[in-house]
Amino acid sequence: MAGWNPFRRKTPAKAARAEALPTAVVKPLIREAHRRGNEGGGLPRFNTTASDQMSGRGGDRFALVRAKLRHAFTPSQPVADRRLFAGRDDTLKTIIRAIEDQRLHVVLYGERGIGKTSLLHVLSQAASEARYIVVYTSCGANSNFDETFRAAAAEIPLLFHSGFSPTAEVTEKGSTLADLLPSEPLSPRKFGDLCAKLTGTRVLIILDEFDRAESGSFRRDVAELIKNLSDRLGRVQLVLAGVAADLTELVEHIPSIRRNIFALRVPKMSEGEVMQIVANGEREADLKFDTPAGAFVVEVARGSPYIANLICHHAGHAALDQGRATVSPADVANAVDRAILEFQGRIPTPAQARVRRLFEQGRQDALAMTARAALAADGVFDSADLESSNEITARKAQEAVEVLVAEGLVKPSPGDGPSQRYAFVEEGLPTLIWMIWAQRNLNREPQAQSQPTRAATAS
């Protein structure tokens, strides 16, 4: 068969030409090939071991700084170290007062990535320091009352039950309230009756990601338990947290328990609080963000602690990759590029294509204004939100919405309010659009850039 055959023997002429390569060229190539083979082919390696220790296999001179950087900025995980908890002092103080002084149950709600779980972790630590028994649970789609509160009962020692002596055998062997529960499914009344007999301690049961629970009966049972605990003066209080635009979206049957709860919408961070995230990371990671770089982070983050941590994380690594311990605006711009790639992986391709087309058509003002309004209003917004967040006229605001509705990027949101409200068809679209706008407009000199559309479209 004609053609190239990889197994065909070399002709004498070809063999002679191969052997004619200079020894000075061949030997270094052979040595390099052996070196790469002995070192695993020169493939990238982990810099730290599974026990978070330096691997001892070399790495660049900033290996230790990289390890600290991973701890300083944690976009994929809530903040667990109180030294890295930025801002929210007033919010935390308000929650503690509601629990301690008013004996209320607490409901925290707000958009994804706003820092609710980090807030709960710090609240848990503060309560534990005050010797509260803290039971922390993350809800799932299949969460049910029986399983959730049996697990909570197993965390409460029988020592604090008024019907048992501290020296009783069952108390001394470490029994819990779960040992007193009946075998049939647990009801809010039965659990409330048990909690009413607690003495000598207080219990905080935290149900994070409450919005993920799909069961309406679970939500109703939790609401009934709150009412029962409040009426019985129980020493057990609940803290619920989840993604929601308003309180009624998170908890059903609100009227029956409204006076028993303290509801708080977790707000976006102020510019000063975002800068505190930057400052905390600088202290922990031995990095420095120069002033323009810090301003760039604040502008891109738009009050989101998640985005601030994500950008700082990537920007820090970008600076270290260039052999610097000082982060510049160019490093933040590099971080925005990386963040866009991450967000693109979470958005359906057709929606991304429509966004790109609008940018290419010069409709970036409509995109940026609407994304800004959505981010400022926790995802659901109206024309008034566009006007206030962009300082534009009502006509410009309505035109911007209509452009995105026509493209299928924004849809009307049901509601009983006086004005029509809207939401993006994909939760991550406002952030992706804002990142792309920042990439194109803030670029590497943020201090010289104007806010999107404020000067250009206010007419």
Image (cartoon, helix red, strand yellow):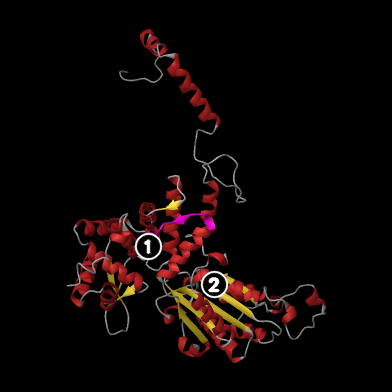
Residue found at x 23% / y 58%: 359
Question: How many marks are shown on the rendered structure?
Answer: 2
The residue carrying pointer 1 sits among few (fewer than 14), some (14 to 19) or many (20 or more) residues within 10 Å by Cα, namely many
**Does residue 335 show up magenta in the picture?**
no
Nearer to us in this view, 187 or 197: 197
- Identify the amino acid type marked 1: Ala
Residue drawn at 59 percent across, 44 percent down = 55
Question: Seen in the image, is 97 located left or right of residue 291?
Answer: right
Quarter of the image where one finds residue 358? bottom left
Image quadrant where one finds the N terminus: top left
Instruction: Look at mark 2 in the image and give the residue it sits on.
Output: 120
Task: Sort mark 2 into few (<14), some (14-19) or many (20+) by Cα contacts within 10 Å.
Answer: many
Give the residue drawn at x 33%, y 63%.
429
Residue 398 as seen in the image, left or right of residue 110: left
Q: Secondary structure at mark 1?
A: helix
Taking the spot 32% from the left edge, 81% from the top edge, the residue there is: 415
Q: Which part of the image, by quadrant, shows the C terminus?
A: bottom left
Residue 289 highlighted magenta (yes or no): yes
Q: Which residues are magenta?
A: 284-291
Name the element at disc 2.
helix
Q: What percent of the width, then of the height, locates residue 448?
A: 28, 60
In front here: 440 or 153? Answer: 440
**In x, y percent, where is residue 248?**
43, 82
* Residue where numbered disc 1 is placed: 295
